[in-house]
Amino acid sequence: MITKLKQIKDERGKLIVFEKDNNLTFDLKRTYFIYYKSSLDRGFHAHYNTNQLLVCLNGTVKIVLDDGYKKTKITLNNSENGIFVPKMIWHYMTDASSDCIMTVMADKLYDKNDYIRDYNKFINEIK
């Protein structure tokens, strides 16, 4: 689920590239940024129809992915890697540093009915 991001580096810094059909495997419809003020956990949901790419632009954050059978915890601490979160994967972010900035790219516009926010309901949907 880790996606390697294309980077162009030189003495001025680096440019990170998101390209359709290369490291962005879906049509981009929505992008948003999460700025952390504390290490409080957030997320705790799955999507019926939305696929996402999570990238930590600054700081550190751990992403917990749960397919209903197995949980995986992945640390994001640089902008060189992203995590692809397909639909119907329960996920949340934990242990974020206070300087953490994340960007989330999604293939759907926001729709409150696309969210499963109750873990037991998620498990029932998976089974």
Image (cartoon, rainbow, N blue to C red):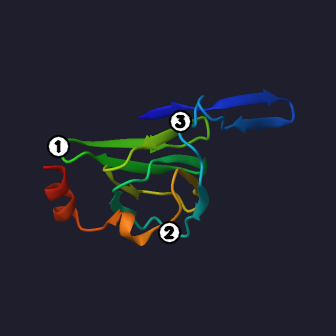
Along the line of sight, the residue nearer the viewer: 65 or 106: 106
Q: Amino acid at mark 2?
A: Ser
- How far is the residue under mark 1 from the one under mark 2? 30 Å
Query: Residue 84: image x %, image y %?
Result: 46, 41
Marked residue nearer the N-terminal end (1 or 2) = 2
Find disc 2 in the rendering and name its residue.
38
Find disc 1 in the rendering and name its residue.
69
- How far is the residue under mark 2 from the one under mark 3? 31 Å
Marked residue nearer the N-terminal end (3 or 1) = 3
Query: Residue 106: image x %, image y %?
Result: 53, 52
Q: Is residue 37 left or right of residue 63?
A: right
Q: What residue is rendered at 58% in x and 32% in y?
A: 23
Mark nearest the camera among 2 and 3 is 3
Q: Residue 72, located in which quarter of the rendered image? A: top left
Marked residue nearer the N-terminal end (2 or 3) = 3
Q: Amino acid at mark 1?
A: Tyr
What element does badge 1 sit on? loop
- The reply to whether the C-beta atoms of the residues labelled 3 and 1 are less than 8 Å apart is no
- Is 22 above or below relative to 79? above
Find disc 3 in the rendering and name its residue.
25
Q: What residue is rendered at 43% in x and 53% in y?
A: 50
Query: Residue 71: image x %, image y %?
Result: 25, 44
